[in-house]
Structure formats: structure tokens, C-alpha cells
Amino acid sequence: MQQDAVLARLEARLGRLHARQRLGIESDHEAQVFGQGLNFFHIENWYSVHAVIRNTLRVAGLYGRGQRNAGRVRLRRNTIVSPRLPSAFAGFTILHLSDLHADMSQPAMAALTELVTGLDYDLCVLTGDYRGQTFGPYAAALEGVARVLARLRRPVYGVLGNHDTIRMVPGLEDLGVRMLLNEAEPILRAGALIHLAGIDDAHFYRVDNIEKAASGIPPGEFSLLLSHTPEIYRQAAHAGFDVLLAGHTHGGQICLPGSIPITLDSNLPRALGAGAWRHHGMAGYTSVGAGSSVVAVRLNCPPEITLHRLELATGQ
């Protein structure tokens, strides 16, 4: 798609200000190593260090094992209990995929497509980072995502991550993904509804707007927020969201024994870096992701997809 056509579609879809703001920030900062974003250092943008990591793992005899681990995607299950959930949504199941990095994680994507085949769920969400690099071409990433989407049931909702250019939005929506960019959608079931909101990248580009995303959600009604990063957990909880689904951290990706991360590339408590957690009554879940970033290896941190089952709290 020609860039002028992409810009025209983005302006029609998002409004002139959001589209041009995001594109301008990308142009200024997309490959920046230091500064910009919620944390100071961005290893994913320091491409000269990637070979150092690979060679270090080779010398340690861990590179081959790490590559094999990166392709062994597993299915995890998580139950989310809330007293505000409408009874019609008891048992409602959400398939959560994050951090596909589809153009550099081909073995993981092949395993993922097999894993999702035949799964029973009501809705699928994608919490960003479809591309391997943080700048440059994105056609291969869209092609990889298309192969995954061919195995997924609709509806599918998504948000962008710090590896994603907003230029990918028309392509993703053409593939059938309803992208939520500081927006919300009602989800209907048996005459009841819940609200699904999503924000643009809050980690690096910082173009998230929780207030806008939540503006149409009536107080007291059950709502979920999709964010690429869990770093906005405080804002999400105070905005009244019942659930926050996120990714970004990869759970550390290369971890010490016991799944202890060396780094989460995030400004947040380590307890929120992987799996289920709670903050001020809000249920959260940080996916460790299905793909890999920087180097396609994983140690002591297997890739995952997650099925979240919503249940109504009783006896309260």
C-alpha cells in the first residue's frame, strides 16, 4: 500500500491529530536507544548488541537449546473472577496472544498455529508487537500475522506495541483485526454487555490515552483494558477497569533458573512481570508472549498463549 494511501486511511480512521502525532514520534524516535519512553535504555533498539548476546550464548553452550525453547509454545489457562461480571458472561473465554514478533519467530508461529486449532473460546485479543524490529519494513510481519489469523476464530481485537508502526493498522484491520487505539467496544452476550477497551503504545511512543478509551464506559459496568505494556497498571486501576491484559515483558525471555528475569525492559514491580496479579481490586495478566525479541531464544521462560475464563464472584 502506498504511503499516501496509508496516511489517508489513518487520518480517516483515527483523526488527523492522532495519526500525524504517532507518525511524527516514530520518525523522531523509533530507533532511539537512550531516552524516550517510560524507561531510559531500550535494548531492543541497540542492534549491535544482538550479536554479542548470540555469541555469548554460543560460548556458554546455550544457544541451540534457547532456539529450541523459543519454538515450544505452551497453552496456559487463567481464571478471572469479578463480582461485577454480568451473569450472562460467566464462562466467557478470551484467547490472549501477545508479542508475536511474527517475522523473526517462525518456529514459534508454526507451533502457535497448531496450538490454536480446535481451541474453544469466545473472543481473541492481541496485545501488540507483531514486528521483530522496531523500525523498517513490516510486510513480512503482516504476512506472519496473516498465517496466524487464518487459524483464529473471529472476533479478534488488537492493540499496537512499541515494535509496531501505526502504518500497520490498515493492514491489520484488512486482515480482520479490530484495532483499539484509545477506543472501546461493547461486547454483547444474551442481552448483557461488557466493555473492551484498548490503548496505543504506552511504553515507548507514549501515545496512550486511557481517559479517551474509558470515556464511553458507564461507571460500574464490567470493563477490560488491552495494553501492550502493563506499566500503566496504576492508571488502569484508578480509571475503574476490572481487568488489564498486557504483554511486552516477555517474562524476561532469558531468565535465571526459577524463571528469575535478568531484565523486564519495563518500569514496574517484578511481581507484575509475568502471569496473573492484582492491583487495587483490578485483575491483571502479563503474557510472556508467544514470540521472541532481540534474539530468538528463550531460557527458563517458555513462550505462551493464554485462555482467560471469566467467572462471576459469588458469596460477596
Image (cartoon, rainbow, N blue to C red):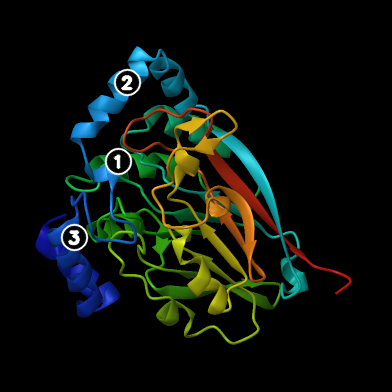
Q: Is residue 14 among the parts visible in the rendering?
A: yes
Name the residue carrying label 2.
56
Q: CA distance from mark 2 to mark 1?
A: 21 Å
Of the numbered discs 3 and 1, the one sitting upstream in the chain is 3
**What percent of the width, then of the height, locates residue 111?**
50, 30
Q: Amino acid at mark 2?
A: Thr
Q: Which residue is mark 1?
A: 132
| Relative horizontal placement of residue 32, taking residue 294 as reference (left or right) | left
Secondary-structure class at tag 1? loop
Q: Label 3 vs label 1: CA separation?
A: 16 Å
In this rendering, the label closer to the viewer, 2 or 3: 2
Image vertical order of residue 37 relative to residue 95, above or below: below
* Res. 81 image quadrant: bottom right
The residue drawn where x is 47% and y is 85% is 215
- Image point 39% across, 39% down: which residue? 147
Lower position in the chain sequence, tag 2 or tag 1: 2
* Left or right: 106, with 35 as reference point: right
